[in-house]
Amino acid sequence: MSCTNCGTAGGGKPNGCKSNGGCSTGGCNRMNAHDWLRNLPIADMDSSCKVIEVSFNNGSRKDFFRNVTLQQFDKGDQIAVEGVSGFDIGEVSLTGEIVRLQMKKRNAREDNPEMKKVLRRASDRDIDTWKQNKSREPEAVIRSRAIARQLKLDMKISQVEMQADGRKATFFYIADGRVDFRELIKIYASEFKVKVEMRQIGARQESAKVGGIGSCGRELCCSTWLTDFKSVTTTAARYQNLSINQSKLSGQCGRLKCCLNYELDTYLDALQFFPDNCDTIQVAKGNAILIKKDIFKNLMWYILPDSNKQYPVPIERVRKIKSLNQQGVIPEELEAVEVTSKKPKEVEPEFVDVVGQISLRSLEKADKKRNQHPQKQNRDQRPQQRQQGNQQKGQQQAQNNNPQRSNQQRPPFNKRGK
């Protein structure tokens, strides 16, 4: 099995891939970094990088370890590394010279004596112990939240990460302020029988650990490739002429979307060519007020006080009007241009009166049956005729038996009294 996204269309399998070639950002490639120095020939093996990058918990956490063993590890191998009073199991994410660039990016030194070491390649027994302790994490999250609620602490336990040997547990929590969790650590240690480490994270880090689908239809950037979270303000939205709508500009973390910063530099560079101090210009009809700038068409949109119509004015014309206003000259008009859209107009279907032109097939079939069997139709009408005749006879009898009839209604008597 192979996919076309990772260069395995010929039927091969990527080195270290655990999804049988079905690459996806939420699987083995989460927080992945492409090793573009992999094919670089190494002249001196002694000077090669002895540090490898190991990812934990499906790529949500990464760290550097020194390879003191004589084994060569490839990307995707599961190895046992030093932990707190034991060992932990992770997956190799990067090896070779690319690790030195990653360490420089994170301000980590290769000769750091406190750097932990790689122990061995993970055995089947190590993997079984690791899976057994990992299965305790969901229950630990529920129990830890209940304990924090009983102690009335203003915090939220986001995730619990167990070490592979089960001797240590890291509790990731979110809090607005400082939390005194000294009593909480004692209860956690006695409840879960582990060494407790509390680590505070932000809302963006929590969203990265949980994951999900964004409004763009793709997986969240923070859970796939984004590692550095920069501050995002509403100023970025204003520069891009976006409406300040909190529901549309906020991500799943409740903060402003990180993608608002992606194109901000492009907008800032383009806005340098627009004239300054042109928020208000004077024309004969009044003061025109600037409402927005279009960097793609080099237009500035103004609105006049007497009308709600928007006037797109080129930036050259705005500069000319501003210079005239400084000289005390007020031009007659803005000289707005016509903006045409390149999108094809939707052709609305014309209204057609179809009254009387639609015939139901069920009624047509019923008419055909009646025309084919007229005797049956007469038979169906006989009971109705009998019922109507009986009703008429009953009415005549009731009138004859009524003694209060008027004399005009009585039949005349003949001379014989009959």
Image: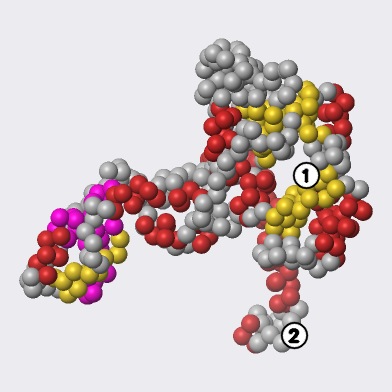
**Does the magenta-highlighted stretch encompass residue 294?**
yes
What is the span of residues highlighted in magenta in the rendered image?
293-318
From the top left corner, tell me how far across and down residue 234 is, in percent: 45, 61
Measure the C-alpha gap from mark 1 to mark 2: 103 Å
Residue 276 position, x and y percent, is: 23, 62
Q: Badge 2: how crowded within 10 Å, few (<14), some, or many (20+)?
A: few
Determine whether 303 is above or below 380 in the image: below
Residue under label 1, please give it: 161
As helix, strand or loop, the secondary structure at mark 1 comes to strand
Position of residue 397 relative to residue 252, above or below, is below
* Quarter in which the C terminus is drawn: bottom right
Residue under label 2: 403
Q: Is there any visible trace of residue 182 in the rendered image?
A: yes
Q: In this view, does 58 lie above or below 297?
A: above
Count of all numbered marks drawn on residues in the image: 2
Determine whether, in the image, residue 189 is placed left or right of residue 103. Answer: right
Specify the amino acid type for callout 1: Glu
